[in-house]
Image (tube, grey):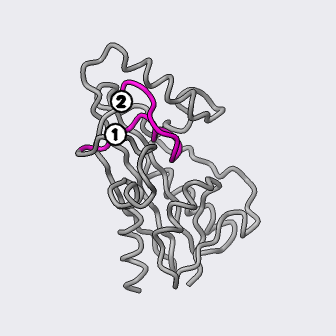
């Protein structure tokens, strides 16, 4: 089976490829010559995932899945949430985003947060969604150089290291994206 993963993020692609069984061939946006920045204009993480999957299906005709992920911080009423990638501005710079978040939390007692990933699957004319959540907390400073995005400042519950300090296998096992992808794979394996 061939299916498009609607992302330009090579780190996400690498993470998901490591989870997908060999009988499922992932195609990237680059593989289908999609060079546009797919719109993400919805008010929710789920809405953005659906919007991206529908864009690929409607404009390129491929069965596909798309994800959207947000970091939701309790003390900030769920921010940055749907705006996680551009929290510090449209330049989508991970360092700027982390620095802004650490500043926003400087005077807060609670640092509880969760990563939430929603995957929208557009397959055989049907749309389904799968959700993965990983609860944890925001650290006081950055640790580690693996991963991407907010990984250096997110420590999952039950662990003493951030996502950026973990190897990819462990992160995929306990992380939000890994959980959502496993739901997706279970669905694809039961076709």
Please say if 143 is above or below 130. Answer: above
In the rendered structure, the answer to whether residue 56 lies left or right of residue 34 reads left
Quarter-of-image position of residue 33? bottom right
SS for dot 1:
strand
Q: Magenta segment: does it hold 136?
A: no
Residue at 34% over, 56% down: 132
Specify the segment rendered in magenta: 139-157
Examine the rendered structure and indicate whether residue 67 appears above or below residue 95: below
Q: Residues within 10 Å of mark 1 (few under 14, many from 20)?
A: many
Q: Is residue 155 magenta?
A: yes
**x%, y% of residue 187?**
38, 77
Tag 1 near tag 2, CB within 8 Å: yes
State the predominant SS element of the stretch in magenta.
Answer: loop
Residue under the image location 61 percent in, 69 percent down: 57
- Judging depth in this view, the residue of 173 and 108 nearest the camera is 173
Position of residue 11 relative to residue 17, above or below, is above
Give percent across and percent down for residue 114.
32, 41
Determine the CA span between mark 1 and mark 2.
Answer: 7 Å
Disc 2 marks which residue? 139
Q: Secondary structure at mark 2?
A: loop
Please provide percent x and percent y for residue 110. Answer: 25, 25
Q: Residue furthest top?
A: 107
| Residue designated by label 1 | 155
């Amino acid at each position: 089976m061939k299916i498009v993963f609607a992302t330009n993020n090579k780190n996400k692609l690498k993470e998901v490829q490591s989870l997908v069984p060999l009988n499922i061939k992932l195609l990237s946006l680059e593989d289908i010559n999609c060079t546009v920045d797919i719109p993400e204009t919805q008010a929710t993480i789920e809405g953005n995932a659906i919007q991206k999957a529908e864009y690929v299906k409607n404009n390129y005709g491929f069965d596909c899945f798309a994800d959207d992920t947000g970091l939701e911080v309790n003390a900030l009423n769920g921010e940055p949430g749907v705006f996680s990638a551009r929290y510090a501005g449209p330049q989508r710079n991970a360092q700027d985003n982390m620095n802004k978040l650490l500043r926003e939390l400087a005077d807060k007692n609670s640092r509880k947060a969760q990563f939430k990933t929603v995957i929208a699957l557009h397959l055989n004319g049907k749309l389904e969604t799968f959700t993965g959540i990983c609860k944890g907390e925001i650290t006081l400073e950055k640790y580690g150089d693996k991963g991407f995005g907010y990984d250096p400042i997110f420590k999952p519950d039950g662990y003493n290291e951030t996502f950026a300090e973990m190897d990819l296998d462990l992160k995929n096992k306990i992380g939000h994206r890994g959980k959502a992808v496993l739901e997706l794979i279970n669905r694809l394996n039961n076709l």
